[in-house]
Amino acid sequence: MLRVIALLLLGLLVLPVQADQRAAWAALREGQALLLMRHTTAPGTGDPEGFRLGDCSTQRNLNDRGRREARRWGQLLRKRKVEQPRLYASSWCRAQDTALEMGFGAVETLPALDSFFSDPSSQAAQTAEMRKAIQQLPADRPVIMVSHQVNIQALTGVSPRNGEGVIIALPLSEPAKVLARIRQP
């Protein structure tokens, strides 16, 4: 009997989380929120010494697992009825490839999403630039942005794992209001 009561109580705790998730997905579909996600799995940390943004062979890149994870994101977004999203990604190949592997088409490079991992002193300026870019986005369809852990944490306070995303309310508040945290599908 105690076990049944414990399970029922646990179920009641999960209901608000599920309702919040549904509301967050609806806000994303309606242009009242955006999905800001960390690129999927690219083994390692940072980038090799002397990497160049225009040359993927000098960067840390997605592995096969990361490509599969990105394709699962595309499947999840379609399942959640996120249609014809605007896709933005940082200049890094792993962010670009994550967005492309979702299978929605063209990806626009948005330098405001670029990582400041190798130059932490640029955090404030980079975060202000990201805020400005987000505020200027058209609200005519869903927005998905692929960036990096440091950028997402600076904007939201959330430190995402590889391939994890946050749905953020629009217009941006200070601090950004996280509606839902979405784990890697």
Image: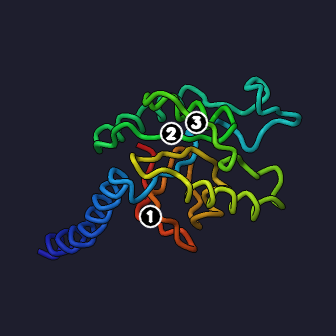
| x then y, percent, for residue 24 | 35, 60
| Quadrant of the image containing the C terminus | top left
Label 3: which secondary element: strand
Q: Quadrant of residue 25?
A: bottom left
Instruction: Name the one closer to the observer, 26 or 61.
Output: 26
Q: Disc 2 marks which amino acid?
A: Leu
Are dots 1 and 3 in contact, CB under 8 Å? no
Q: Say which label, 3 or 2, has the lower sequence index.
A: 2
Instruction: Name the one closer to the observer, 28 or 183.
Output: 28
Left/right placement of residue 80 relative to residue 41 reads: left
Are dots 1 and 2 in contact, CB under 8 Å? no
Residue for badge 3: 108
Are dots 3 and 2 in contact, CB under 8 Å? yes
Using the image, tell me which numbered label, if any, was put on residue 169: 1
Q: Establish if 102 lies above or below 171.
A: above
- The colour mode here is rainbow
Tell me the CA gap for discs 1 and 2. 17 Å
Residue for badge 2: 87
Q: Disc 1 marks which amino acid?
A: Ala
Q: Say which label, 1 or 3, has the lower sequence index.
A: 3
Q: Say which label, 1 or 2, has the lower sequence index.
A: 2
Q: Establish if 68 lies above or below 164.
A: above
Q: Spot the residue most to the right.
A: 50
Instruction: Name the one closer to the observer, 159 or 43.
Output: 159
| x then y, percent, for residue 141 | 39, 46
| x then y, percent, for residue 35 | 46, 51
Q: Establish if 127 lies above or below 101.
A: below
Label 2: which secondary element: strand
| x then y, percent, for residue 32 | 39, 59
Which residue is pictured at 57% across the width and 65% down the height? 156
Left/right placement of residue 164 relative to residue 59 reads: left
Which residue is pictured at 56% across the width and 44% down the height? 146
